[in-house]
Amino acid sequence: MKILAIESSCDDTAAAVVEDGRNVLSNVVASQVPEHILYGGVVPEIASRRHVESIVGVVREAMHQSGCAYGDLDAVAVTYAPGLIGALLVGVNFAKGLSFATGLPLVPVHHLRSHIAANYLTHADLEPPFLALVVSGGHSHIVQVDSYTAFRIIGRTRDDAAGECMDKAARAIGLPYPGGLNLDKASADGDPKAYKFPKPSVSGSPYDFSFSGLKTAAVNLLHNAQQKGETVPVADFGASYIAAVVRSLTENTEKAALDCGAQKIVLAGGVSANSVLRRECGKLCKKHGWSLYMPELRYCGDNAAMVGAQGYYEFCAGKRADAALNARATMGIDVG
Ligand code: KG4
Ligand code: ZN
């Protein structure tokens, strides 16, 4: 079964053709990084306009690379929530038009579910149930994945997302957008013990995260150094900061996995590309004898192949949308 998938939830315009949820026939991503770099972050209005300009060419290219004609497809899947509303609307309306014109069924896909499904593209043996750590620019969740379409949130951030927290620190020390990736690269040779950052915890909720205190601590550290005329080495600052974020993520995941009796741990979302998080999760899983699944780097960030993967399982579960489908800026992974 072949699905054409479309993704436009943030600043990547993406389309892919995926067979049976696992086999990627094409995967095209038009990045908007050069547009947003000027502003140090994603400007929603600009993102929407670029999606409008790019989407026809991106979908055409995905169809061309897949070698499929529309008559070979079985469905159109599209990200409809959560994300930037103006950006989501471009993909949703395009998919609705395509579904209307071709008669193909339309399958709405939750963005975070598709980040988890990115793992199905690489790990042919991966099947639910498993515990997922979902860390992106807008979300940080520990999720119990009971089946391909049944999700329970075990832990969540009380304030900022891990990716946002990486981006803010990167920006504060003068690194360009995309901050998380650049902070990771700039910190490779840094000393993770050079600076002390607070250990965030949420009292009474052992699996929940709180990153706003860490972010404030980073900004204060940089201000204090500036006032004293001291320079802060980017690599040491970044390595110490990333270590603090990753410690929080891995400690809570460990607690949740032990309490849930999980044997399989899955990483997902843009931050799952982080080299320290990948390494530390590897150590954690080795210590407990758990299996660790991580997306390939090309499937960590936003892409449409992962939408095609999750779209297949949503389709098999009978999920369909019609011309009344709307985009939603927020929606729980357990709902969507
Ligand atoms: O999943 P994603 O591509 O978009 C959202 O759905 O939000 O995640 C983007 C986030 C950004 O905050 C970005 O800085 C972060 O993922 N990110 C990283 C790395 N690569 C991307 N954070 C840390 N280390 C990385 N290597
Ligand atoms: Zn994403």
Image (cartoon, rainbow, N blue to C red):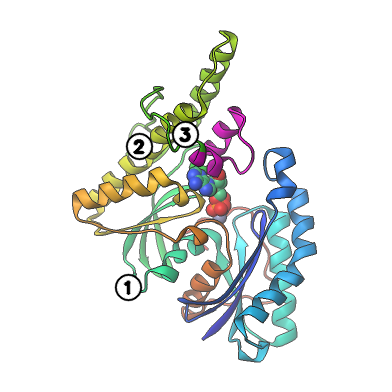
Q: Looking at this view, is 2 or 201 the one in front?
A: 2
* Residue at position x 45%, y 70% in the image: 121
Inter-mark Cα distance, 2 to 3: 12 Å
Image spot of residue 9 (x, y percent): 64, 58
User: Hey, which quadrant is residue 149 in on the image?
Assistant: bottom left
Q: Is residue 139 visible?
A: no
Inter-mark Cα distance, 1 to 3: 34 Å
Image spot of residue 313 (x, y percent): 46, 75
| Magenta residues (range) | 164-185
Give the residue type at disc 3: Phe
Give the residue type at disc 2: Arg
Residue 125 — which label? 1
Extreme residue in the top direction: 228
Q: What residue is shown with label 2?
A: 247
Question: What secondary structure is marked by label 2?
Answer: helix
Q: What residue is shown with label 3?
A: 211
